[in-house]
Amino acid sequence: MRASAAPPIPAGASSNLLLEPSVMTTHPSVPIPPPFSMPPLAAAGLQLPILGPWNNGLRPPGAEGVNVLPSPNLAPSADPVADGYWDALSQIGGLFRLDDAQFVFQGWDEKAESLQIGVYHHLTLLPPGPETVGTSCTCPGWKARATCLHVRVLVAHLVDLLVLVRVAPTPVPPAVFLHSTPFRDIHVFSCVASTGKYESGKRVIVTYQREGRWHCQSCRYTDSCKHKPHAIDFARIAGLVDRSDDTGTVQDKEDDAEASLLLAAGGHNDHRHGSISSLHIPPPRWCALPHEATAMIPNPEVFGLHMSGSFLDSVSRCACGRSIATLSALERQTARSVPAILYGLARRQEVLIEVIPCPSCRHVRRSIGPDLGACGVFNWNNAYLFTHELLDSYTGSFTASETPFSAFCLATRRRYENYSEDMKFCSEETFVRAWFAFIQLQELGGTMLCPTCGTRPPVIIADGASANRGFVMYA
C-alpha cells in the first residue's frame, strides 16, 4: 500500500547591527558593515509586540508608544550561503528558541553545504542602544572577525525566529534540554555556569555522550566545570540517565548508523536545486495502481551502446530549472561532451553526455543536461547517472523487508565486485540523495485521504516501517 527582537527603532534612525563578544555584558558598539544592515523602521512597518527583554519600560529616544518590530529583509540571491543554511535549518531542525532574545543554531559546514553534527552556537539579541540593535554569537568566527554566518541568518529571518515555540519556560532555567540525537551526543542541553545577581548569564552547550561521559563546550571534560551539574540534575529528574550511577548510564546504547546517514544526506539543501531529470517517471509495475500507466524499463546495456553524447533535446535543463529552450543560438553552440558514470543494478560504466554551461548558475558544476528518462536513466547531476532499474530495486526492497540504505548499498557493492574488484559503487550518502530526488519524479501517490481535510491534513500520524506499509493517517 502506498501513501501518499529586536526592539523598535525610530523612523530614519540608523539601524546597523552592533558587535558584541560572546559574553553578554556592556561593550563598546562597533557597527557591522553592509550587507547586514537592517532596513529603517518606516520601510518595515511590521506590527509585532515589543519583546520581553525590553518590556521593562526602556525605549530608545522617540520610540515611546511605538509597538513595531523591524523586519529584516535580505533578497534570496543577496546571500546564497545564508539562504542555504536557513533552508537546511528549517527543513531538518537544529534550531531552538530559548526566549525572546536567545536562540541556539546547529552549525553549518559551508564547504560541504550541510549541517554539522554535534556543533551548536548560542545567539543573543542584546538590549538596544539609542539608535542600534546589538547581537552576540558564541562561534569562533564571530570572536575572530566580528561577523559570522549565524548572525546573518538571525538578521535575515528574525521575524520567522520570533514565532518559533519556546523550548524553555520564563525565566529560562539553568539547564534547558534541547533534543536527543542518535549520534555521539545523545542528549543536548543549554546551560549557564551559575545563577545569581552578578552572573553574566552566558550559556554553553553541554552534551551527554554515548560512551557515558558529560562534555561541556567550554570546559571540555574537566571535573571543575560549573555548567555540567545543571544538565546532570535535569537529566536525572527527567529520567534521561540512570539515577543509580553518578555519571549517568545511557538507556539505549545502540549506534544508529542509518539515522546518521539520513541526517547527513538530508542536511544538504537539495530541495533548492532539483535533479537534471525532470520528466514524470512511471511507477514500477508491481506497485502501480489500476489507473496509472507503466512502461518497460529499457535495458541499460543497450543504452550504454548508444551513449554518443548527443542527448540534448527540447526538455534538457539545469538543476536550477533553466531550460535549453531559453538559450540563444550562440549559447547552444557551447555544447560539449563530458564523461559521466552510469550506475546500474549489477555494474557501472563510464559514458558520455552532452551538456551546455548554464548561464544562470555560472558554476563549473552546473550545466544544462539531458533528461534521459526515455532511456531508463535518471540524470541526477550530469556526473552521476542511475538506472531506473537500480532505484526501483531499492523501492521494492525496503517495502518488502525494511531494507536500510546502508544494507542495500552493501549488497550492490558485492554485485559490482562480481565484475571487477576495482568496480566501486557510489557513496551511501550520494545514493540516498539520488533516490529521494528520483521518487519525487515518480509521484508515488495514492487513494488515501481524510474525508474532512483531504489529501493534506495538518496533522499526520504514521505507524509502520515505511510510508508504503502499515500507513495510518489521522486528521
Image (cartoon, rainbow, N blue to C red):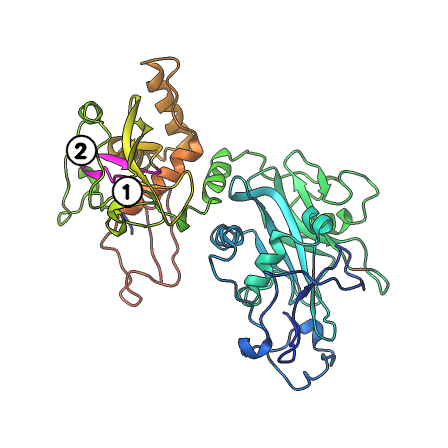
Residue 392 within the magenta-colored segment of the rendering = no
Compared across the picture, whether 26 is left or right of 464 comes to right
Looking at the rendering, the stretch of residues picked out in magenta corresponds to: 369-381
451 above or below 56? above
290 above or below 260? below
Compared across the picture, whether 63 is left or right of 295 comes to right
| Tag shown at residue 267 | none
| Tag shown at residue 277 | 1
27 above or below 139? below
Q: Specify the quadrant of the image occupied by residue 31.
A: bottom right
Q: Position of residue 406 (x, y in %)?
A: 42, 30
The amino acid type, in three-letter code, at marker 2 is Ile
Under tag 2, what secondary structure?
loop
Graded by Cα atoms within 10 Å as few (under 14), some (14 to 19) or many (20 or more), the crowding at tag 1 reads many
Judge by depth and name the residue closer to the eye, 429 or 354. Answer: 354
Q: Earlier in the sequence, mark 1 or mark 2?
A: 1
